[in-house]
Image: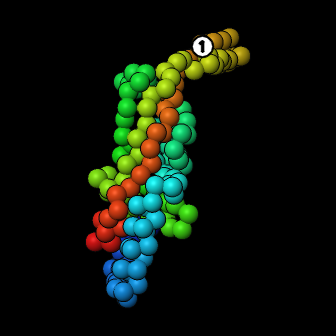
Amino acid sequence: MNRLFIRPLMFCRRFATNPEVINPNAQQEVAATVSSEVSQPKNRLFAVVYVGGKQWKVTQDDLIVIFGNNPLKVGDEIKLEKVLMLSGKNFSLFGRPFLDRAKVHVDAVVVEKAPKYPELLHYSNQHYLIRIERWLSDMSTTLRVTKVRADDDVFQANTQ
């Protein structure tokens, strides 16, 4: 690797500072507010999850379409563990890079598994009189998010 790319990286790491808690009372107030928001069942939460190489903003009863051949069957219940962010009406929790999978729960059910609409792959080289046409069809899996919830002490896991 070239030294021009290494030096700025080393410069940034040298002057980076560790985060500090300035006011612990304010931190406890925020934790109490987040816990009260999460514990109320009428509050609708949404999450940003990482599935199939993409980030999806999901809430309850949303549909996600994942392309590729997954080893899932229709009716399988899965837990989406790579949760990047959890948010409600008055708060947002961000993971670094993910939130604790024991505290945040995003559950989904496989609704449909079907082939994607066929696409034509066309390659032509006029100089050599080469013409290649292929039909490509990939599998798609549709997930329905059934539940987005978090434990009451979800904030405690992220502050340590």
Depth check: give the residue in front, 158 or 46: 46
Residue 30 x, y percent position in the rendering: 42, 76
* Residue for point 52% across, 61% down: 88
- Seen in the picture, residue 152 relative to 79 is either above or below; the reply is below
Question: On the rendered structure, is 127 left or right of 76?
Answer: right
Element marked by disc 1: strand
Q: Residues within 10 Å of mark 1 (few under 14, many from 20)?
A: few
Q: Is residue 143 left or right of residue 18?
A: right
Q: Residue furthest right?
A: 126
Vertical arrangement, residue 124 with respect to residue 5, above or below: above
Near-viewer residue (61 or 143): 61
Q: Position of residue 17 (x, y in %)?
A: 36, 81
The quadrant the C terminus occupies is bottom left
The structure residue drawn at horizontal position 34% and vertical position 85%, both measured from the top left corner, is: 24
Q: Position of residue 56 (x, y in %)?
A: 52, 46
At x 46% / y 65%, what residue is drawn? 37
> Is residue 4 or residue 31 the one in the foreground?
31
Amino acid at pointer 1:
Trp
Q: Which residue is mark 1?
A: 135
- Classify the position of the N terminus by image quarter: bottom left
Q: How many marks?
A: 1
Is residue 76 depicted above or below 120 in this figure?
A: below
